[in-house]
Image (cartoon, rainbow, N blue to C red):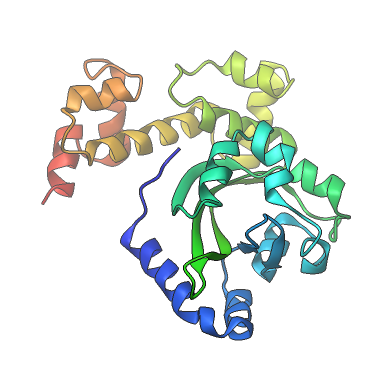
Amino acid sequence: MEEHISTQQSNLAQSFQSAFGNEDLLFQLVDLFPIPIEIFAPDGTTVFVNRACCELWNVPGPEHIIGNYNIIRDPVVNDELGLREYVRRAFEGETLSVSDVKVPLDDLSNRYEARDSSFDVFALYTDITCFPIWDKHQKIAYIVNIFITSSLYQGSPDIARAKEYMDKHWLDEFELSKVAEAVNLSIYHFARLFKKHTGETPYSYYKKIKIEKLKEKLRDKNLSITETFTACGVDYNGAFARIFKEVVGMSPSEYRESVMK
């Protein structure tokens, strides 16, 4: 769980607090936000959810959620997603952030009638920032949840499932058989299907993930280049240093130097 709150997120929380004096205006502004936002009462009941939230989650409308959903009593969020402690601390007034939470789309689909039968999102992961809005007596008036999509898998269910599997197992050594097994397809059929839908091989997709993770770690000046590769599950003296240079156009050391300027 990530608990670091960026300056931008902190400023956003302050903006919500400043707008608290006019709640009608606050909710009108939130509804115009292009990112999903859900607002809870201190008892955990949803009092507002914006249109972006409903559209992303494929919920017919906010009236299906407002007053009908309570996050504190939701076993999916608290137990299946493992966020019980996060919810508890949030409703005690802490400002928190959690990364890469899988949105329970199946649960949402079962709880609410799907609005759009063409909805093709297979899996959705989100970063959540949560902060309180205080009343004049310094008691919690609302809890605001802001959702920023971190990963979205849509289209062919088999391809989406394969991408999700590789994204979540990027630390592991690539094995085509394991990816094919994860989507219940033969290696031959899966490889052909993946190339047809994406224009690249499964291994090419895996390499891109690995390279992005390496680039992210290389920006951490507290890690040596060898430690960077180790943290990403590969050996700096192995083939991936060469692959990195082929894909990025510069060696790991050259890349680090370029981003540290």
Instruction: Determine the image quadrant of residue 231.
Output: top left
* Residue 60 seen anywhere in this rendered image of the structure: yes
Q: Is residue 109 left or right of residue 188?
A: right
Residue drawn at the location 84% of the way across and 60% of the way down: 116
On screen, residue 148 above or below 138 = above
Look at 61% across and 21% down and name the residue there.
179
Indicate the quadrant where residue 159 lies: top right
* Relative horizontal placement of residue 102, taking residue 73 as reference (left or right): left
Q: Quadrant of residue 58?
A: bottom right
**Whole-percent x and y of residue 152?**
60, 47
Judging depth in this view, the residue of 21 and 155 nearest the camera is 21
Query: Residue 163 at what x, y percent from top left?
Result: 59, 34
Q: Nearer the viewer, residue 236 or 30?
A: 30
Q: Position of residue 121 (x, y in %)?
A: 71, 48
15 above or below 36? below
Q: For the point 52% across and 78% down, which residue is it?
A: 20
90 versus 216 height, above or below: below
